[in-house]
């Protein structure tokens, strides 16, 4: 066996091991499938072991492949950490890390503030554009480095170019006009919203992942989704439009205050909105390392990843965040 295994070949191996599909793994790494296959064969020759059982219908890890996988992951993590430490980016005079936290009151903002405190030498530039669907395009194009939101709502071909880590299960809530019949409740059972119409971003393509979450939640509960409306820019304009329309709004417990409206958590069951930190696959930057560490710390301190016994998730999210 060679004493100098190629990180590129190890990345190819890990991608195929996780996807169990050569075409998807190649797309994930932005390489041709033939090049990926060559790297796997070369790695197998170096190790003197067969790592995958291939057939026309499926790909499976061999026992040797299963044995290699944890070592490969640890090796690549150490390699990325080393590269980030000496990249020269993000320190004083280095390239800032562009982070979209959606809103000044958000889980992303909490994580960003913790990272700034822990890594004062790194420059983070915050952006406040709601919607992971829109942010994902900017992430892939290199116009943005990190964002936060519901990854299960992204198309698979987009998600394959991104990496993500679950940060928090936010409780879903409803924003009600103060004179609404349910405004006096401390919590609102979902059944009480039957017959109601709620705004959930329909018409704003940038927040399609939130609208699809709402459709899953409202299905078979008699709750109607408000008709599509043009994208609303800014908190002040959002508050004006919502009040003018008399809308109730599907939100989360982490949401900006709106004058004349009250925020009430939903219950029976408790709908949860998974918030993940998302970044471009292969990104290396000290700021990303600081953000990931801050996210883990905030999640542990706030018990953000605990799911209540009566918690509800869309099937897509439940499958992704097992």
Image (cartoon, rainbow, N blue to C red):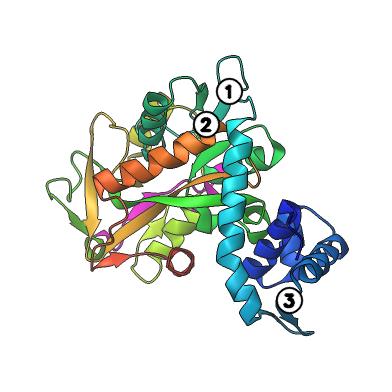
On screen, residue 130 above or below 171: above
Mark 1 sits on what residue? 96
User: What is the distance, in whole Å, between disc 1 and disc 3 at their CAs?
Assistant: 43 Å
> Mark 2 falls on what kind of element?
helix
> Mark 1 falls on what kind of element?
loop
Give the residue at x 57% y 50%: 77
196 is within the stretch colored magenta: yes
69 is within the stretch colored magenta: no
User: What is the distance, in whole Å, between disc 1 and disc 2 at their CAs?
Assistant: 8 Å
Label pair 1/2, CB-CB below 8 angstroms: yes
Q: Is residue 48 left or right of residue 68?
A: right
Q: Is residue 204 visible?
A: no
Mark 3 sits on what residue? 49
Give the residue at x 37% y 54%: 273
> Mark 3 falls on what kind of element?
loop
The part of the chain drawn in magenta is: 193-209
Mark 2 neighbour class, 10 Å CA radius: few under 14, some 14 to 19, many 20 or more: many
On screen, residue 250 above or below 25: above
* Image coords of residue 204 (percent x, y): 55, 43
Give the residue at x 39% y 38%: 294
Front-lying residue, 74 or 303? 74
Front-lying residue, 231 or 300? 300
Q: Is residue 55 left or right of residue 214?
A: right
Mark 1 neighbour class, 10 Å CA radius: few under 14, some 14 to 19, many 20 or more: some
Of callouts 1 and 2, which one flags the residue occurring earlier in the amino acid sequence? 1
Front-lying residue, 296 or 305? 296
Give the residue at x 71% y 52%: 7
User: What is the distance, in whole Å, between disc 2 and disc 3 at their CAs?
Assistant: 38 Å
On screen, residue 205 above or below 239: below
What is the quadrant of residue 256 in the picture? top left
Mark 2 sits on what residue? 287
């Amino acid at each position: 066996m060679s004493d100098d295994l190629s990180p590129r070949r190890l990345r190819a191996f890990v991608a195929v091991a996780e996807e169990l599909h050569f075409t998807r793994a190649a797309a994930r790494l932005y390489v041709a499938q033939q090049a990926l296959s060559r790297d796997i064969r070369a790695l197998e020759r170096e190790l003197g072991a067969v790592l995958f059982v291939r057939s026309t219908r499926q790909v499976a890890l061999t026992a040797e492949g299963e044995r290699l996988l944890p070592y490969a992951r640890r090796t690549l993590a150490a390699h990325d950490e080393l590269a980030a430490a000496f990249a020269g980016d993000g320190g004083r005079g280095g390239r800032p890390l562009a982070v979209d936290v959606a809103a000044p009151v958000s889980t992303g903002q909490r994580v960003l503030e913790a990272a700034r405190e822990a890594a004062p030498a790194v420059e983070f530039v915050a952006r406040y554009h709601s919607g992971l669907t829109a942010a994902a395009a900017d992430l892939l194009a290199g116009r943005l480095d990190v964002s936060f939101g519901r990854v299960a709502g992204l198309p698979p071909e987009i998600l394959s170019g991104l990496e993500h880590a679950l940060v928090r299960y936010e409780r879903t809530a409803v924003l009600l006009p103060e004179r609404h019949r349910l405004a006096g409740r401390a919590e609102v059972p979902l059944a009480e919203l039957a017959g109601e119409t709620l705004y959930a971003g329909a018409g704003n393509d940038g927040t399609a992942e939130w609208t699809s979450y709402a459709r899953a939640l409202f299905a078979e509960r008699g709750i109607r989704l408000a008709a599509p409306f043009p994208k609303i820019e800014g908190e002040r304009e959002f508050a004006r439009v919502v009040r003018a329309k008399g809308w109730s709004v599907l939100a989360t417990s982490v949401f900006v205050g709106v004058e004349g409206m009250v925020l009430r958590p939903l219950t029976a069951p408790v709908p949860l909105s998974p918030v993940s930190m998302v970044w471009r696959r292969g990104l290396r930057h000290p700021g990303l390392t600081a953000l990931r560490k801050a996210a883990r710390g905030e999640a542990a301190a706030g018990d953000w990843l605990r799911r209540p016994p009566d918690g509800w998730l869309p099937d897509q999210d439940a499958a992704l965040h097992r």
